[in-house]
Image (cartoon, rainbow, N blue to C red):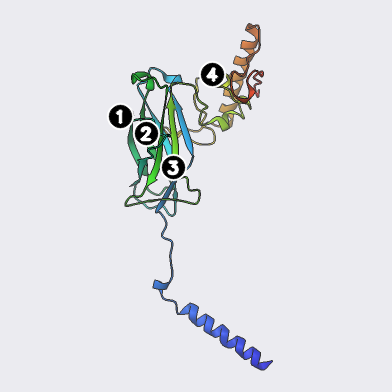
């Protein structure tokens, strides 16, 4: 018994010495701040609500995997030239791609041209981008969202902030729902969960309720003045009556 205790004690001492004796050069530290990936797989923009505009800007978010630093840093992207890219280089322009100082979220500002003014038959243009290694960042991250599918069109597309809209306007989406939201509130996006990337403004719950009530009043007025109720015109709920939250 004493022999076994002695053996365990010697092993314990050796282990402690081994851990203590490791030099700084033997320990791998994760420095952080060197990996980026997109926060979405796809993002779209519609000129339907601003058909007179020759150009508009998409703001695409990237997430930093690691530690922020106290200086602004640029990141790089490259075009994925496959069937998911139909836009040519003269139909878009990268305005800025940076991660701000002391932040973990960066923004790619992409200026895109309205297809209506390009003398082309297509109403929708597509661009697939991938994060590209540069002197500050590598492409990567646990989500591996290193590519994103971007689309801009003259057609009506589901707004980016629909997940917030559905709790104040109506729970089911269709193009007619979006048209009614725009007609009744003047809003094309509903920055409730996230701030507006351009202004930083975020709606509060009271404002959400006011806009929801305006939408409901608009739908009820439509129903009162038409022979049939306002219905979903496309998507999974096509033909169903649109029921406001309020």
**Mark closest to the chain's N terminus, 1 or 2:** 1
Which mark lies nearer to you, 1 or 2? 1
Which mark lies nearer to you, 1 or 4? 1
Q: Which mark is residue 90?
A: 1
Q: Quick check: marks 1 and 4 in contact, CB under 8 Å?
A: no
Q: Quick check: marks 2 and 4 in contact, CB under 8 Å?
A: no
Q: Residues within 10 Å of mark 4 (few under 14, many from 20)?
A: some
**Mark closest to the chain's N terminus, 1 or 3:** 1
Q: Which mark is residue 147?
A: 3
Q: Which quadrant of the figure has residue 165?
A: top right
Q: Quick check: marks 2 and 3 in contact, CB under 8 Å?
A: no
> Can you give x and y, in whole percent of width and height, for residue 117 in the image?
34, 19
Q: Quick check: marks 1 and 3 in contact, CB under 8 Å?
A: no
Q: Quick check: marks 1 and 2 in contact, CB under 8 Å?
A: no
Q: CA distance from mark 1 to mark 2?
A: 12 Å
Q: CA distance from mark 1 to mark 4?
A: 31 Å
Q: Which quadrant of the figure has residue 54?
A: top left
Q: CA distance from mark 2 to mark 3?
A: 15 Å
**SS assignment at label 3:** strand
Q: Which mark is residue 211?
A: none
Say which residue appears at 41% left-offset and 52% top-offset: 35
Q: Which mark is residue 110?
A: 2
Which mark lies nearer to you, 2 or 3? 3
**Mark closest to the chain's N terminus, 2 or 3:** 2
Q: Quick check: marks 4 and 3 in contact, CB under 8 Å?
A: no
**SS assignment at label 2:** strand
> Can you give x and y, in whole percent of width and height, for residue 139 in the image?
41, 49
């Amino acid at each position: 018994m004493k022999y076994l205790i002695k053996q365990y004690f010697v092993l314990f001492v050796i282990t402690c010495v081994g851990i203590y004796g490791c030099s700084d050069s033997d320990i791998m530290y994760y420095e952080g701040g060197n990996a980026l990936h997109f926060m979405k797989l796809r993002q779209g923009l519609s000129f339907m609500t601003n058909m007179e505009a020759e150009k508009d800007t998409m703001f695409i978010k990237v997430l930093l995997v690691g530690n922020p630093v106290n200086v602004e840093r640029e990141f790089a992207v490259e075009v994925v030239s496959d069937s998911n890219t139909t836009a040519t280089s003269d139909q878009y322009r990268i305005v800025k791609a940076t991660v701000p100082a002391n932040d973990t979220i960066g923004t790619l500002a992409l200026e895109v041209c309205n297809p209506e003014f390009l003398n082309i038959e297509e109403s929708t243009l597509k661009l697939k981008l991938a994060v590209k290694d540069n002197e500050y960042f590598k492409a990567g991250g646990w989500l591996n969202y290193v590519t994103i599918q971007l689309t801009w069109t003259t057609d009506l597309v589901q707004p980016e902030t629909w997940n917030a809209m559905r709790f104040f306007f109506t729970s089911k989406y269709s193009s007619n729902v979006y048209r009614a939201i725009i007609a009744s509130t003047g809003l094309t996006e509903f920055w409730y969960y996230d701030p507006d990337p351009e202004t930083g403004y975020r709606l509060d719950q009271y404002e959400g309720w006011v806009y929801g009530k305006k939408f409901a009043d608009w739908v009820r007025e439509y129903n009162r003045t038409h022979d049939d109720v306002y219905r979903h015109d496309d998507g999974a709920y096509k033909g169903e009556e649109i029921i406001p939250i309020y």
